[in-house]
């Protein structure tokens, strides 16, 4: 249902993105041929006819052919998916690895100068737009120091069903800057979220009891307090991973990262409707899937939900 | 177990790539452009970058050198037997990349394929009415009418191997209409005769070319063995890739980055005149403008208003402030590189705002009026900024411009024929694909005429019956002096009537690493034949 709605909204929007034909033919192509092409592609039908046609094919796993690249959309997305997924997962991992300890630390040592420093940093991270962070990184590490490649994925290893940059040095080098760029916003979000939740939990009665029982501070913070902050945090993080995949668009276009986001943004520019519709549908699917996983995870973390 | 096999796959792939690495002496040239070629099929899309890139892989009978002069390609010589008949002598001993020999049959096949359904080269194929094979290396080519530009058009007829196409079921040009069916094999594979072979390609990501060792011409300037092409969409990323030393050449470079490139060590900006003319057009066909405060009449039908516009725009200010001194202000709708250009006719309108004001007052618009201007914002060099400048200049003489700047997809959808020429005042750029002035006449200046396929891009509907007569002469007169006289007369009429407001030829703007020599062709094509690495 969600996906059907997304598809319908997407199709309604496609009426306003412009004319695909002008990008598909050269300037010497006659008007009659242009009209014929439009007719052949089914662009003259009403939006509902077009939508019905699309849904019928999509159910069978057929998304048509890209107007611009003239390859099946399914193939194009399959080619690009690994790049986006590797980038998103690495930055999610980075964000969690750095964000959770920082969040816990800032909650426990609220007044230390280091915690204050972290909070200032997270404020900067949350307010700087992604493309600016990316450009700064490129300028500093790519152009001035020349340590890291400024664009692309480096050498990738093709495993047949998957292409990965994790197995080569240039692949890792290429990953660093885009992953950091993408991770910073998520990281700062996690820091602030964990800190706020922790402060709340630390004030609650059972923590006071735990202290009264003389448990070690470390075990209170990590096994009692942190565990209880995780439920809302997981919801947010789950959705954030979805948005990492969906909104890698900006990072991907700054770093010319050959993922789905770049494919999508180029599709918008050239009015490549088959790619746009398939991409939006896929993202809707990812969000549905993540919501499901998050719901299942609640059960694993919160024993109260398992009672009935 | 699975993990282990993954690691092994990775390691062996690493080892393989090490083995496959080119020897140290081999020269690799890396470049980036803002987009990618849409297809490897040379007949499926008539677009500059696609054809320019494929020109390294496929070859025409007649080619351009770096100064856009016609030179022998797969034909060694050609002569006019009669005004409508040419005799071509083909080059012998040429082999396609798969080893097949090149003969007259391949030329005839290519011509037929260009005319096939789905081809975007149908207009070019239509210029030739008949091809007759005399022997394997002699060909008679006939045109329906005397045509002085057919040789220019032939520089974009890329010859494909007939046998290969038949074998791979690619005898018809691939087209976007093939959606859903099996696409043409030629979209993703190539078999040309050119000096470079496509080794691998992932659209939008990377295309690798290697030198074709058995190419017929051993005197090509280039010393490059391998070309790696990466599309990089964002201008800032493109420039950074050049500055960081990962790429040898990038284009286009925003003109505002020239200073930075020239002050950075090891790279420089490379600017030259492009054959693209940027101009403004006005709706002169409707009785009332679609987007204006003037109701009941069309101010652009009044020549005084058109003149007032012409004299209100300061071309030199646009050149200096927006184009960083790199544009060539123009009084003609075609550039100096175009066949038929005559410097004597090329006088831009004088900048004279006082005269503009007077003309507007005479025409009854002393208090000015409002008109909407359509402008693309991602198509030409600084297109939106030019429109803003024009709006500012027009404001000085009392005309208020409502600027509607949009991405090219939306802009073209609105202003071109399929959008019903829905514009009152617009900015457009034009490079004739044939590099001959006739294309400009037929597309932009001739009266709109659907049956004759004329004036399709004459968005404002400018129409002059004398120019229509002269266009017919330009189309078919093979006597150069007579033809030039017709061109010059039309240029004068067009300028006197202010049919269009030409602005300038925009600059080519490339960024290149020091020591890398390239030829910057006026049609913005990068020919690998002219790339010399240090």
Image (tube, rainbow, N blue to C red):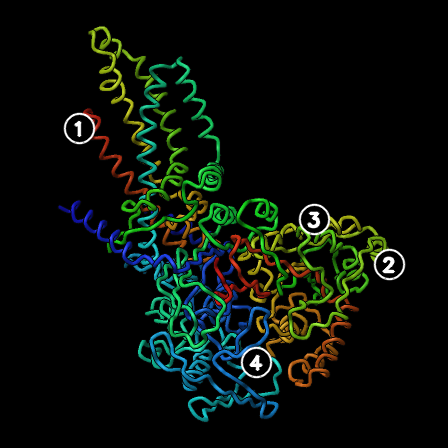
Q: CA distance from mark 3 to mark 1?
A: 70 Å
User: Residues under labels 2 and 3: Cα distance?
Assistant: 31 Å
**Label 4 secondary element:** helix
Q: Could you say whether the residue bearing mark 2 is in a helix, strand or loop?
A: helix
Inter-mark Cα distance, 3 to 4: 40 Å
Q: Earlier in the sequence, mark 2 or mark 3?
A: 3
Front-lying residue, B233 or A242: B233
The residue beneath circle 1 is: A306
Disc 1 crowd rating (10 Å Cα; few below 14, some 14-19, many 20+) is few
Task: Tell me how far mark 1 sits from mark 2, CA to CA.
Answer: 87 Å
Q: Position of residue B272 (x, y in %)?
A: 62, 59
Alpha carbons under labels 2 and 4: distance apart = 49 Å
Q: Which residue is mark 3?
A: B321
Q: Which residue is mark 2?
A: B362
Determine whether the residue tagged by mark 1 lies in a helix, strand or loop.
helix
Q: Is residue B236 visible?
A: yes
- 2 vs 4, front mark: 4
Q: Is residue B316 above or below residue B169?
A: above
For the residues carrying marks 1 and 2, which lies nearer the camera in this image? 2
Residue B151 numbered mark, or none: 4
Residue occupying the far left of the picture = B1
Whether labels 2 and 3 belong to a single chain: the reply is yes
- Residue A216 is labelled as none
Judging depth in this view, the residue of B353 and B459 nearest the camera is B353
Instruction: Give SS at disc 3.
Output: helix
**For the point 39% across and 77% down, which residue is it?**
B172
């Amino acid at each position: 249902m969600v996906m059907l709605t997304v598809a319908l909204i997407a199709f309604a929007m496609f009426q306003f993105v412009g004319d695909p034909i002008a990008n598909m033919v050269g300037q010497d192509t006659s008007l009659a041929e242009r009209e014929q092409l439009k007719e052949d592609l089914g662009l003259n039908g009403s939006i509902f006819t077009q939508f019905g046609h699309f849904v019928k094919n999509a159910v069978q796993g057929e998304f048509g052919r890209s107007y611009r690249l003239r390859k099946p959309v399914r193939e194009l997305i399959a080619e690009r998916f690994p790049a986006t997924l590797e980038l998103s997962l690495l930055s999610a991992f980075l964000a969690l690895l750095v964000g959770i300890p920082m969040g816990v630390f800032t909650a426990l040592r609220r007044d230390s100068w280091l915690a204050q420093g972290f909070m200032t940093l997270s404020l900067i991270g949350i307010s700087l737009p992604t493309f600016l962070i990316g450009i700064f990184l490129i300028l500093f590490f790519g152009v001035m120091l020349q340590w890291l490649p400024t664009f692309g994925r480096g050498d990738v290893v093709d495993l047949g069903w998957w292409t990965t940059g994790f197995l080569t040095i240039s692949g890792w080098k290429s990953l660093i800057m885009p992953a950091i760029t993408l991770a910073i916003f998520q990281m700062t979000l996690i820091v602030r979220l964990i800190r706020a939740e922790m402060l709340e939990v630390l004030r609650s009665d059972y923590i006071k009891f735990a202290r009264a029982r003389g448990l070690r501070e470390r075990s209170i913070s990590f096994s009692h307090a942190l565990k209880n902050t995780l439920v809302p945090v997981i919801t947010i993080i789950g959705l954030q991973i979805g948005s990492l995949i969906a909104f890698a668009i900006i990072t991907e276009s700054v770093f010319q990262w050959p993922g789905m986001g770049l494919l999508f943004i180029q599709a918008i520019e050239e009015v490549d409707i088959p790619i746009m519709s398939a991409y939006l549908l896929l993202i809707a699917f990812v969000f549905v899937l993540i919501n499901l996983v998050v719901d299942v995870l609640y059960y694993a973390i919160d024993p109260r939900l398992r009672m009935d | 177990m699975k993990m282990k096999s993954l690691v092994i796959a990775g390691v062996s792939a690493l080892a393989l790539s090490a083995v496959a690495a080119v020897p140290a002496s081999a020269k690799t040239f890396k470049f980036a452009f803002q987009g990618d070629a849409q297809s490897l099929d040379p007949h499926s899309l008539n677009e500059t970058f696609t054809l320019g890139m494929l020109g390294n892989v496929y070859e025409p009978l007649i080619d351009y050198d770096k100064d856009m002069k016609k030179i022998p390609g797969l034909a060694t010589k050609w002569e006019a037997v009669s005004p409508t008949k040419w005799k071509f002598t083909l080059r012998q001993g040429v082999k396609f990349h798969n080893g097949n020999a090149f003969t007259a049959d391949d030329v005839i096949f290519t011509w037929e394929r260009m005319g096939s359904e789905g081809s975007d080269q149908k207009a070019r194929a239509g210029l030739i009415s008949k091809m007759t094979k005399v022997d394997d290396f002699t060909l008679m080519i006939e045109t329906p009418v005397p045509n002085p530009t057919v040789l220019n058009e032939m520089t974009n007829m890329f010859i494909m191997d007939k046998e290969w196409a038949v074998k791979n079921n690619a005898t018809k040009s691939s087209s976007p209409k093939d959606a859903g069916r099996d696409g043409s094999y030629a979209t993703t594979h190539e078999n040309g005769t050119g000096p470079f072979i496509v080794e691998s390609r992932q659209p939008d990501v990377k295309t690798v070319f290697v030198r074709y060792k058995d190419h017929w011409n051993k005197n090509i300037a280039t010393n490059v063995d391998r070309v790696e092409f990466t599309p990089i969409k964002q201008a800032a990323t493109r420039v950074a890739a050049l500055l960081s030393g990962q790429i040898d050449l990038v284009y286009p470079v925003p003109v505002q980055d020239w200073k930075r490139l020239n002050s950075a060590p090891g790279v420089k900006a490379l600017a030259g005149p492009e054959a693209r003319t940027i101009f403004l057009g006005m709706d002169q066909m409707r009785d009332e403008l679609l987007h204006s405060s003037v109701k009941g009449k069309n101010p652009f039908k009044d020549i005084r208003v058109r003149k007032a516009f012409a004299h209100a725009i300061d071309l030199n200010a646009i050149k200096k402030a927006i184009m960083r001194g790199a544009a060539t202000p123009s009084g003609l709708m075609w550039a100096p590189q175009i066949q038929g250009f005559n410097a004597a006719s090329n006088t831009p309108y004088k900048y004279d705002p006082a005269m503009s004001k007077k003309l507007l007052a005479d025409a009854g618009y002393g208090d000015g009026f409002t008109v909407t201007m359509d402008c693309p914002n991602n198509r030409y060099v600084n297109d939106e900024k030019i429109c803003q400048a024009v709006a500012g200049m027009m404001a000085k003489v009392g005309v208020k411009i409502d600027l509607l700047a949009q991405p090219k997809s939306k802009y073209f959808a609105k202003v071109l024929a399929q959008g019903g020429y829905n514009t009152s005042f617009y900015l457009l750029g034009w490079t004739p694909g044939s590099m001959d002035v006739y294309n400009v006449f037929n597309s932009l200046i001739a009266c709109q005429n659907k049956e004759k396929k004329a004036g399709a891009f004459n968005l404002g509907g400018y129409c002059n019956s004398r120019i229509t007569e002269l266009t017919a002469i330009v189309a078919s007169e093979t006597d150069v002096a007579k033809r030039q006289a017709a061109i010059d007369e039309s240029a004068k009429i067009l300028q006197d009537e202010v049919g269009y407001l030409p602005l300038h030829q925009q600059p080519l703007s490339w960024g290149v690493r020091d020591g890398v020599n390239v030829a910057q062709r006026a049609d913005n094509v990068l020919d690998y034949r002219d790339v010399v690495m240090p």
